[in-house]
Image (cartoon, rainbow, N blue to C red):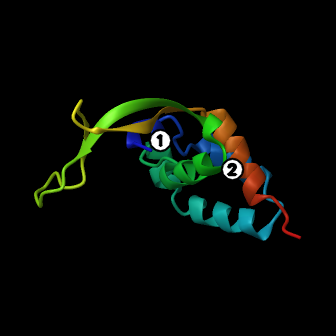
Amino acid sequence: MPLDATNDVPLTVGFLNRLKSDRTTSAAEFVYRVLSALEEDIRSGRRSFWDPLAAAVVSDEDLVTVEEIPLTVVEEERPESGRTSESEAGSRVRVAMTADSERFEQMYLDTVNRRLP
């Protein structure tokens, strides 16, 4: 899940407002309070659903479009350590290319509002 794909699911004031009016569980209330504390960053466009999107794709890969790309990883200790790059010498890896923001946001809201048995 590269950051490029998570750019398709920015954390917006619109989403925060949806959550404000759709919080029926203690989990949703908690998420709303945490995100409300970040409202300045959200308004500035500095927040995206980085990790939540990656987690959601584990249960619903249709949230993203995927391509198989040969990648290598910089393993040596240097400033680029851990960086991936496309290389024909690399291993073929399924990479998320784009994400469906509307579908993801609805899934997120449904999840935080799900009542556990």
Indicate the amino acid at tag 1.
Thr
Using the rendered view, name the quadrant where residue 3 is placed.
top left
The secondary element bearing badge 2 is classed as helix
Q: Is residue 20 left or right of residue 56?
A: right
Indicate the amino acid at tag 2.
Tyr
What x and y, as percent, mark residue 87? 23, 32
Q: Residue at the location (45% across, 42% down)? A: 45
Q: Residue furthest right?
A: 117
| Quadrant holding the C terminus | bottom right
Q: Residue at the location (60% across, 32% down)? A: 100
In the rendered structure, find residue 29 and report the number of the disc placed on it: none
What x and y, as percent, mark residue 104? 65, 41
Residue 25 visible to an observer of this rendering = yes
Q: In this view, does 104 lie to the left or right of 99?
A: right
**Can you say whether 19 is above or below 106 in the image?**
below
Choose the circle earlier in sequence order: 2 or 1. 1
What x and y, as percent, mark residue 68? 42, 31
Q: Residue at the location (59% across, 59% down)? A: 36
| Quadrant holding the N terminus | top left
Alpha-carbon distance for marks 2 and 1?
14 Å
Along the viewing direction, whichever of 60 and 47 lies nearer the viewer: 60
Q: Mark 1: few, some, or many residues within 10 Å (few <14, many ≥20)?
A: many
| Residue linked to disc 1 | 6
Q: Mark 2: few, some, or many residues within 10 Å (few <14, many ≥20)?
A: some
Residue 84 visible to an observer of this rendering = no
The secondary element bearing badge 1 is classed as helix
Q: Residue at the location (24% across, 30% down)? A: 88
Along the viewing direction, whichever of 83 and 48 lies nearer the viewer: 83
Along the viewing direction, whichever of 34 and 50 lies nearer the viewer: 50
Q: Is residue 87 left or right of residue 104?
A: left
| Residue linked to disc 2 | 108
